Image (cartoon, rainbow, N blue to C red):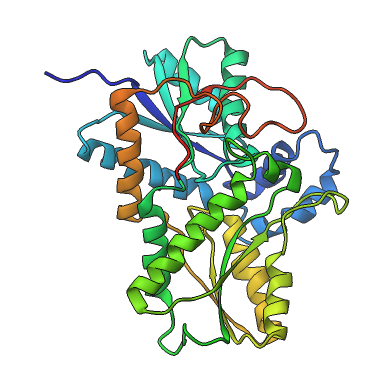
Amino acid sequence: MTTALAYDAVVLLGFGGPEGTEEVVPFLERVTAGRGIPKERLVEVGQHYFTLGGVSPINAQNRALQAAIAAALAAEGVPVETALANRNSPPFVPDVLADLAGRGHRRVLAVATSAYSGYSSCRQYREDLGLALESTGLQLDVRKLGPFFDLPAFAATITELLLGCLPADLDLAADSTRLVFTTHSIPTPMAHTAGPSGDGYVAQHRRVATQVADGIAAATGVTKPWDLVFQSRSGPPTMPWLEPDVNDALREFAAAGATDVVLVPIGFISDHMEVIWDLDTQAQETAAELGVRLVRTPTVGTHPAFVAALAARIATELRTGSPEPGPGQFCFAGCCANPRREAPVVAGVAQDPPR
């Protein structure tokens, strides 16, 4: 006899991106809504999309991840319908939820394409869902899986990809070789309110970086010091954001004698625009000007070990269901608070913070 699942659909939540030149400015208008940014400025900002024909790679990457998760869930013995819903481009969250409800689904588990706690990386996705339910009046029970940075396979996959891409002539043990982890910068006040007890955003990245460095040491015998830097700042100069910026850090490393930098984007799960533009274009240009060789490692993407581990966590929740979390747990009501306003949110699923 088949055991009934706690949910009847899984929705993968993405940021979204344009898929043609005519979509670039409307996409950026949605991303920056309420900030009063002139259209001509958005056209200027959109140049890195225009250089790729107006197509962001993120949607195709998330469709591939959705398919991989669906296959892995089937292999786990929990075949369930999966869908992709985006914040800033079609298919939009309200439309996807309406489609699922119209076809008889009643309880949906949402999984964000971000591994960490934080307003933009976690709570805002809960708001996307909450606002969609409020605007449509749909009778759906929707919950969001908590951050998954603590999956051992996440750091292990990053380590494997890092070791697999190092040039043969790179001496990882040399003092002139720097190991540098990077993630999206966020406003400092948001960083202080991230996670169940605050300051979780940086702490979670440092946890993953430590696990990767330990994995390198286990595989190579090289115990390597490391740095955590930030990228993709977009706020006004008057607002403090997490630092150092990756380009500023590269200049400091070069001045201290670095000749090689292994740059590891642990803050992202796919090679989307902020990886391609901010690292493969801008950071590479900075490194070239400094005479530094920059080796950028791949993100986890649809690596089978990562997908299997994420699917296993999803499958556990599908089978068991979890109570709504309380204070001290990820995704409880006040976790990663919206710094500007109150907005409706869906519940998370109860998870104890990893020790």
* Above or below, 262 relative to 237: below
- Picture quadrant where residue 148 is located: top left
The percent coordinates of residue 47 (x first, y second) are 72, 58
Residue 127 or 203: which is nearer the viewer? 203
Quadrant of the rendering where the N terminus is positioned = top left
Q: Is residue 322 left or right of residue 129?
A: left
The percent coordinates of residue 262 (x first, y second) are 53, 75
Q: Is residue 54 left or right of residue 58?
A: right
The percent coordinates of residue 64 (x first, y second) are 39, 47
Residue at 82% x, 44% y is 39
State the residue lying farthest toward the right: 238
**Visible residue check, residue 267:** no
Q: Is residue 226 left or right of residue 316?
A: right
* Above or below, 263 relative to 167: above
* Above or below, 288 relative to 73: below
State the residue lying farthest toward the front: 355
Residue 314 or 83: which is nearer the viewer? 314
The percent coordinates of residue 223 (x first, y second) are 45, 76
- Picture quadrant where residue 53 is located: bottom right
Q: Is residue 95 left or right of residue 258?
A: left
* Above or below, 324 relative to 82: above
